């Protein structure tokens, strides 16, 4: 049975300041938990699960110290879950510390002020699908370890490195790398060939990419529009662009 202090601790991890203070994050659901446990860069701290889940995943106990296992009833899982409908398992994992990234011979996604957790989670998942292994997000973007972000990645957060930087300074420090900005009025995507080395930037859901960044971008590209929608969701736009340039 969980103590009040344990419940309070887990619930506190819904807030960014406590996730940072403790250096951990929460994930829920069998698929995500299994992918994170198998990841070589993410360390499991504790698992809270139903008896049924433990019965089906006996091998997991070989990968975490035995003292970090908790078998809970459905009502106890509901107390600590961040979801409307709790899964059979919730895990706490240590936030990985990434070394500096390299921009040579690879595509790097840059995010300028992405605010929606679901959007960021989907962007991470799309990056994973197209083999893009690193994302640089502006410091005002949503935290990648927000529980809603983690859930939206469907496990891809175990394979995509996300770091936070001052985007303008980062671009200036790496000006030798071509920068492609997704805009509404750039060159049509069909004129862009395959790309092997570049930074590809996507902007805020409502404001787009800041003018300061647009001024230093080498290439502004746009997805041709046939209908009347004002714009595309940031994650959808990124998926279309990557499908063309990768």
Image: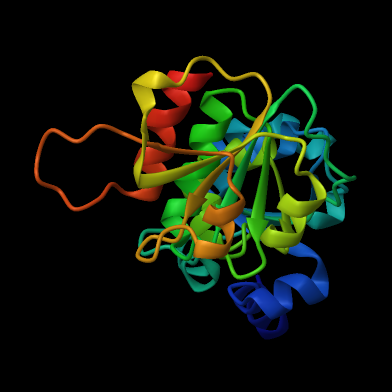
Res 39 → quadrant: top right
- Quadrant of the rendering where the N terminus is positioned: bottom right
**Whether residue 113 is visible:** no
* Residue found 55% across the figure and 70% down from its top: 80
**Whether residue 218 is visible:** yes
Question: Between residues 185 and 73, which one lies in front from this camera angle?
Answer: 185
* Residue found 70% across the figure and 33% down from its top: 58
**Which percent across, then down, holds residue 32?**
57, 40
- The answer to whether 10 appears left or right of 150 in the picture is right
* Residue found 58% across the figure and 57% down from its top: 213
**Which percent across, then down, holds residue 65?**
88, 48
Residue lying furthest top in this view?
A: 194
Question: Between residues 45 and 1, which one lies in front from this camera angle?
Answer: 45
- The answer to whether 93 appears left or right of 122 in the picture is right
Up/down of 24 relative to 224, above or below: below
Up/down of 53 relative to 204, above or below: above
* Residue found 70% across the figure and 79% down from its top: 17
**Which percent across, then down, holds residue 184?**
32, 47
Question: Between residues 223 and 172, which one lies in front from this camera angle?
Answer: 172
* Number of callouts: 0
- The answer to whether 184 appears left or right of 1 in the picture is left
Residue lying furthest left in this view?
A: 228
Up/down of 87 relative to 35, above or below: below
**Which percent across, then down, holds residue 240?**
37, 29
Q: How is the image coloured?
A: rainbow
Up/down of 76 relative to 158, above or below: below
């Amino acid at each position: 049975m969980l103590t009040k202090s344990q419940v309070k601790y887990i619930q506190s991890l819904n807030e960014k300041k406590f996730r940072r203070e403790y250096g951990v994050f929460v994930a829920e659901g069998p698929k995500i938990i299994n992918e994170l446990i198998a990841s070589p860069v993410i360390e499991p701290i504790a698992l809270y699960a139903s008896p049924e889940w433990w019965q089906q995943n006996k091998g997991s106990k070989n990968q975490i110290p035995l003292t970090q296992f908790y078998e809970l009833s459905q009502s106890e899982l509901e107390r600590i879950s961040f979801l409307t409908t709790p899964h059979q398992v919730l895990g706490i994992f240590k936030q990985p510390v990434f070394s500096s990234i390299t921009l040579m011979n690879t595509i790097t996604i840059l995010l300028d002020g992405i605010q929606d957790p679901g959007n960021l989670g989907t962007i991470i998942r799309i990056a994973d699908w197209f083999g893009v292994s690193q994302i640089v997000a502006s410091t005002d973007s949503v935290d990648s370890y927000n529980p809603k972000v983690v859930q939206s990645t469907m496990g891809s957060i175990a394979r995509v490195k996300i770091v936070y930087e001052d985007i303008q300074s980062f671009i200036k420090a790496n000006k030798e790398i071509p920068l492609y900005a997704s805009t509404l009025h750039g060159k049509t995507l069909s004129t862009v060939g395959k790309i092997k080395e570049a930074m590809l930037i996507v902007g805020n859901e409502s404001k787009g990419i800041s003018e300061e960044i647009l001024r230093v971008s080498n290439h502004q590209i746009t997805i041709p529009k046939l209908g009347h929608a004002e714009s595309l969701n940031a994650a959808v736009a990124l998926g279309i662009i990557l499908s063309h340039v990768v």
